[in-house]
Image (tube, rainbow, N blue to C red):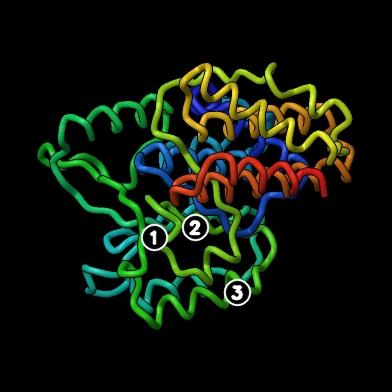
């Protein structure tokens, strides 16, 4: 995985690496959070991993990796109101654009085709946006368009207003009935900004806007000693442990969820060939993403922890 992204998001990186290695990556992915530049870098890295002809390392110099770093790969396409336009509309992703995507899917390809959906504009960046842009450049990837008179291509979160109604309906059919070797990636600030029909057919991952995080797992890992078995009798004790750690260390409950996800990816990495454990981990990580959504909806931490604990024990 790209070194910058791996250092910043170790559990996401390991999860995606394993999913790609096992050919288990979902056909439609939502990356959500406030930093759309880093989401775009993550999307390009997924495209690179899916198409690398050699060892998938950050410095791989195969043709596919070179093309993707330069944002010139014929099978990797950014779709926005200003990118890959086939008509004169300037405010939405149009029906013509979606038809263009669908037309490319008619024929088979040796490449794994990736379509990255976002909103975008060419603008002069604020100081905060320059910081995000600099972080993106450090990943080694190139933006879709070159800088123009101090203005830079700027990705932002896609939402329902970014699609024409006809375009959205046309795209849904492709997501519902995906062809092989095709991945759709949606970049957004909030999953609720997307059509629920897209969300329900996608795997969603929160891409935190933060510097490198150290994930501490010792306080809860004993509960996973016999994973995938999770003792239901210990579920409430598990909840008490999470609440106590949160209080004693004055940390956010989202951080605790991230720690559990990180630990599960460590288990996944050690059990790559165990399909039963892999299936359980994929489901549990998705459940934890749902738990984060509950927390952001201001549901009490104890309620969310209990919901997760009894889910793990099922």
**SS for callout 1:** strand
Q: Position of residue 127 (x, y in %)?
A: 16, 30
Crowding near pointer 2: few (<14 within 10 Å), some, many (20+)?
A: many
Q: Residue at x 81, y 47 (%)?
A: 279
Q: Position of residue 40 (x, y in %)?
A: 42, 43
From this view, report whether residue 153 is shown above or below residue 60. below
Q: Give the Cα distance between marks 1 and 2.
A: 7 Å
In front here: 147 or 289?
Answer: 289
Quarter of the view holding residue 143: top left
Q: Earlier in the sequence, mark 3 or mark 2?
A: 3
From this view, report whether residue 23 is shown above or below residue 260. below
Q: Is residue 75 visible?
A: no
Q: Mark 1 touching mark 2, by CB under 8 A? A: yes
Q: Earlier in the sequence, mark 1 or mark 2?
A: 1
Q: Residue at x 31, y 50 (%)?
A: 156
In front here: 201 or 243?
Answer: 243
Quarter of the view holding residue 19: top right
In front here: 205 or 94?
Answer: 205
Q: Earlier in the sequence, mark 3 or mark 1?
A: 1
Left or right, residue 58 beside residue 21: left
Q: Mark 3 touching mark 2, by CB under 8 A? A: no
**SS for callout 3:** loop
Q: Give the Cα distance between marks 3 and 2.
A: 15 Å
Left or right, residue 57 beside residue 144: right
Crowding near pointer 1: few (<14 within 10 Å), some, many (20+)?
A: many
Per the image, the residue denoted by label 3 is 106
Residue extending furthest toward the bottom: 166
Q: Residue at x 53, y 75 (%)?
A: 172
Q: Position of residue 221 (x, y in %)?
A: 75, 23
Tell me the quarter of the image containing the N terminus: top right
Per the image, the residue denoted by label 1 is 79
Per the image, the residue denoted by label 2 is 115
């Amino acid at each position: 995985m790209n070194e910058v992204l791996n250092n910043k998001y170790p559990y996401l990186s390991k999860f995606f690496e394993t999913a790609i290695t096992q050919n288990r990556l979902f056909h439609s992915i939502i990356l959500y959070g406030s930093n759309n530049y880093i989401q775009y870098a993550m999307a390009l890295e997924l495209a690179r991993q899916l198409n690398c002809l050699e060892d998938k390392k950050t410095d791989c110099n195969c043709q596919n990796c070179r093309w993707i770093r330069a944002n010139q790969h014929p099978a990797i396409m950014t779709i926005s109101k200003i990118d890959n336009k086939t008509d004169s509309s300037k405010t939405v992703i149009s029906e013509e654009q979606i038809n263009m995507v669908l037309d490319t899917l008619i024929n088979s390809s040796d490449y794994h085709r990736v379509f990255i959906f976002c909103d975008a504009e060419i603008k002069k960046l604020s100081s905060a946006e320059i910081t995000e842009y600099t972080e993106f450049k450090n990943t080694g990837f190139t933006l879709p368009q070159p800088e123009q008179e101090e203005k830079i291509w700027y990705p932002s979160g896609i939402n329902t207003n970014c699609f024409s109604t006809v375009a959205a309906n046309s795209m849904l059919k492709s997501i519902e009935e995906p062809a092989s070797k095709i991945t759709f990636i949606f970049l957004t600030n909030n999953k609720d900004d997307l059509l629920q029909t897209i969300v329900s057919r996608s795997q969603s991952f929160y891409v935190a806007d933060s510097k490198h995080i150290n994930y501490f797992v010792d306080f809860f890992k004993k509960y996973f000693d016999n994973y995938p078995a999770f003792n239901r009798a210990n579920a409430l004790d598990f909840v008490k442990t999470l609440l106590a750690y949160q209080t004693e260390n004055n940390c956010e409950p989202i951080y605790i969820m991230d720690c559990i996800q990180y630990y599960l990816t460590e288990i996944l990495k050690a059990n790559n060939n165990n399909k039963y454990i892999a299936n359980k981990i994929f489901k549990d990580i998705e459940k934890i993403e749902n738990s984060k959504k509950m927390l952001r909806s201001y549901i009490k931490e104890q309620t969310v922890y209990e919901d997760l604990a009894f889910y793990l024990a099922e």
